[in-house]
Image (cartoon, grey):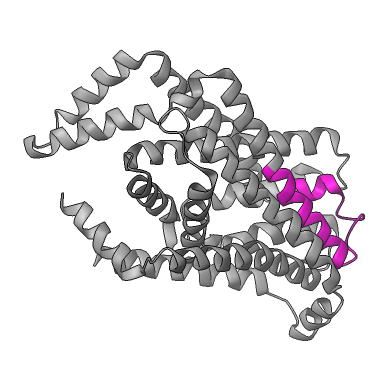
Amino acid sequence: MARHLRTLFIVAVGILCFWYVLKGINFQDLVTAFKQFHLAWILPALAIYLTGYVIRGFRWVVLLSPIKKCRYGSLFPTLLIGFMLNNILPFRLGEFARAYLNGKKESISASASLATIILERLFDGLTMVLVLTFALRFGHLPLDPANLSPDIQKGIHYAPILFGSAFVVLFAMILFRTAAEKAADFFTGLAPVRFRPGLRHLASTFLEGLKTLKNVRETLFVLLASVAAWTCEFTCFYLLARGFDLAPHPITYFTAALIMSVVNLGILIPSAPGGLGIFETVGKFLLLPLGVAPAMAVAYILIVHLVVWAPITLWGLYYFFKEGLSFKQLEQEQRSAQKV
């Protein structure tokens, strides 16, 4: 019952978002805007975008290295399967599936894998905050942040606090490992007796997954890899703007960085599959103050979302079936794990 209510909630939010996105848009104007797009720009945009995922694969190798030296060729398919599942399942469930699949494949704890994925998301959030700050301060953007939606202004304000606090907590857990373990023992002691051993093992292996933060060189590599991956992404946004003749004005390279960072900060929150609806809503909020016509803004953000969603979904599906996986199998194993 709860599962169906969550699904209905997601559908309702998606419908509401698309109602806002398409509100006041003349269908003929939207068709005209799409016709103005130069398809040749998709190839370089796609090439640079997919390069970002190749970089993410190397980043995950480094994040997992304190636990186990994993081969890139083994991790990369699992990484893409996880992103594919995020694109088609709600609440970013692909993260948990990736942790489970990697744990099974590499014979390591799923909770340790999940810890490295959480670190990925924190480094992603930190990187987008850095990109956002750099764009706002040094980009000479053709818009006043004060003219943005109040919700977006709040997101820009609170994102550094959120991700900064999360990093402080994780670093503290690493530096004060004994205290963290005692705290975990205390909280797991509140659970029913039969669950305590499993929860303690979960907490212990999760702390193992944070070991990368103890190594300065590896932490720096992960941060630089995150910057490189997201630079590929906002370069994709910029190249697609060139396809609509929206760049270099009013969408500059720095404006593309702003749009990319705010949109992705929005969809980092567990939501509809692939951030469907939220991606378009935030994108439209950002494009209108730039002077982009509503129909053109909608056409551009829809093309961007298609380019960043479809290739990774198809690539992930290829590996999913190549490795002999099935959605029914994943669901059954998830239910089995919940019963344990």
- Magenta segment range? 229-257
- x, y percent for residue 306: 66, 68
- x, y percent for residue 124: 59, 40
**Which quadrant of the structure image shows residue 20?**
bottom right
Q: Is residue 261 visible?
A: yes
Considering only vertical position in the picture, is 152 above or below 218? Answer: below
Quarter of the picture containing the N terminus is bottom left
Residue at the image position 47 percent from the left and 55 percent from the top: 82
Considering only vertical position in the picture, is 200 above or below 2? Answer: above
* Of residues 152 and 198, the one drawn nearer to the viewer in this rendering: 198
Residue at the image position 70 percent from the left and 51 percent from the top: 51
- Could you tell whether 248 is left or right of 30 in the image? right
**Which quadrant of the structure image shows residue 298?**
bottom right
Residue at the image position 25 percent from the left and 59 percent from the top: 333
Considering only vertical position in the picture, is 74 above or below 205? Answer: below
Residue at the image position 49 percent from the left and 19 percent from the top: 214
* Residue 216 part of the magenta segment: no
- x, y percent for residue 323: 42, 63
* Of residues 321 and 120, the one drawn nearer to the viewer in this rendering: 321
Q: Is residue 143 visible?
A: no
- x, y percent for residue 116: 45, 36
* Of residues 334 and 60, the one drawn nearer to the viewer in this rendering: 60
Q: What secondary structure predominates along the stretch shown in magenta?
A: helix
- Could you tell whether 210 is left or right of 301 in the image? left
